[in-house]
Image (cartoon, rainbow, N blue to C red):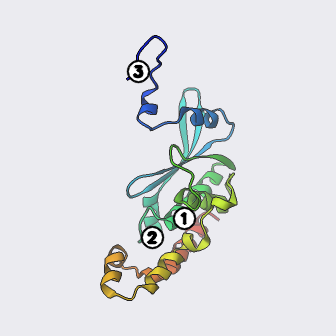
């Protein structure tokens, strides 16, 4: 560890790689609220947060467990779930008269086609204005699960098929039917916020 009269100890959250204070400051002084996307091992949490002097205020929040209310039977952390959760959060924000926000991805890397941008695409399609480049948005095939369905169709070995898709099969979903399931859940979400 450094020492001396000119050594300055970084903030604890920076040392623990939890907060980038430079990026945080830019987002905090903006007039728009932050669209915060965070991933855990099993779920996704999306919040619209307003920064004030005394602290941050969560205006809108959605959790991937909310998708269970609409009949979602697949993982709560894949690209399809991320898109649907972004759509729910976008509609909730519009109900509270929030029309635009800045994306806050924390310390995650901005990788083209990642789940972060699937959340943003869902929020943008709901009507919430979040600035993002169209090159980083995942393809529609990845969002609706067509990529997984095509891969499941290509597997000929039944043991390999069972091994790869055991979680889907336990939940009563054939991997080939993921796009249909995605559109059924999406059709249940849209009327609630019209």
Q: Helix or strand or loop: what does disc 2 sit on?
A: loop
- In the rendered image, which residue does mark 3 sit on? 2
Above or below, 66 against 107 in this view is below
Distance of mark 1 from mark 3, alpha carbons?
47 Å
Point out the tag, 2 or 1, that comes first from the N-terminus: 2
Point out the tag, 2 or 3, that comes first from the N-terminus: 3
Query: Given contact means CB atoms under 8 Å apart, are the residues at marks 1 and 3 in contact?
Result: no
Q: Which of the two residues, 143 or 8, is positioned nearer the viewer here?
A: 8
**Taking 68 as reference, is 48 left or right?**
right
Distance of mark 2 from mark 3, alpha carbons?
52 Å
Quadrant including the C terminus: bottom right
Above or below, 125 against 188 in this view is above
Q: Which of the two residues, 131 or 129, is positioned nearer the viewer here?
A: 131
Q: Classify 10 Å Cα crowding around label 1: few (below 14), some (14-19), many (20 and above).
A: many
Q: Which of the two residues, 190 or 41, is positioned nearer the viewer here?
A: 41
**Residue 84 is drawn in which quadrant?**
bottom right
Label 2 vs label 3, nearer the camera: 3
Distance of mark 2 from mark 1, alpha carbons?
10 Å
Coordinates of residue 101 in the picture (x, y in percent): 65, 47
**Taking 124 as reference, is 44 left or right?**
left
Above or below, 114 against 188 in this view is above
- Taking the spot 46% from the left edge, 10% from the top edge, the residue there is 5
- In the rendered image, which residue does mark 1 sit on? 84
- Taking the spot 39% from the left edge, 89% from the top edge, the residue there is 156
Q: Which mark is residue 72?
A: 2
Q: Which of the two residues, 178 or 96, is positioned nearer the viewer here?
A: 178
Query: Given contact means CB atoms under 8 Å apart, are the residues at marks 2 and 1 in contact?
Result: yes
Coordinates of residue 143 in the picture (x, y in percent): 56, 69
């Amino acid at each position: 560890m450094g020492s001396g009269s000119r050594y300055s100890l970084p903030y604890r959250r920076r040392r623990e790689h939890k907060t980038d204070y430079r990026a945080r400051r830019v987002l905090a002084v903006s007039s728009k609220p932050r669209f915060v996307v965070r991933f855990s091992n099993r779920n996704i949490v999306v919040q619209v947060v307003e920064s004030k002097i005394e602290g941050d205020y969560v205006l809108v929040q959605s959790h991937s467990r909310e998708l269970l209310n609409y009949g979602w039977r697949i993982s709560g952390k894949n690209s399809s779930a991320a898109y649907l959760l972004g759509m729910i959060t976008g509609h909730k924000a519009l109900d509270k008269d929030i029309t635009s926000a800045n994306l806050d991805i924390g310390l995650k890397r901005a990788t083209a086609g990642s789940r972060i941008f699937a959340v943003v695409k869902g929020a943008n399609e709901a009507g919430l204005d979040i600035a993002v480049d169209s090159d980083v948005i995942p393809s529609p095939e990845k969002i609706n699960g067509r990529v997984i369905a095509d891969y499941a169709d290509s597997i000929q070995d039944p043991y390999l098929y069972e091994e790869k898709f055991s979680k889907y099969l336990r939940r009563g979903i054939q991997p080939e039917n993921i796009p249909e399931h995605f559109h059924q859940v999406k059709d249940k979400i849209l009327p609630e916020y019209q």
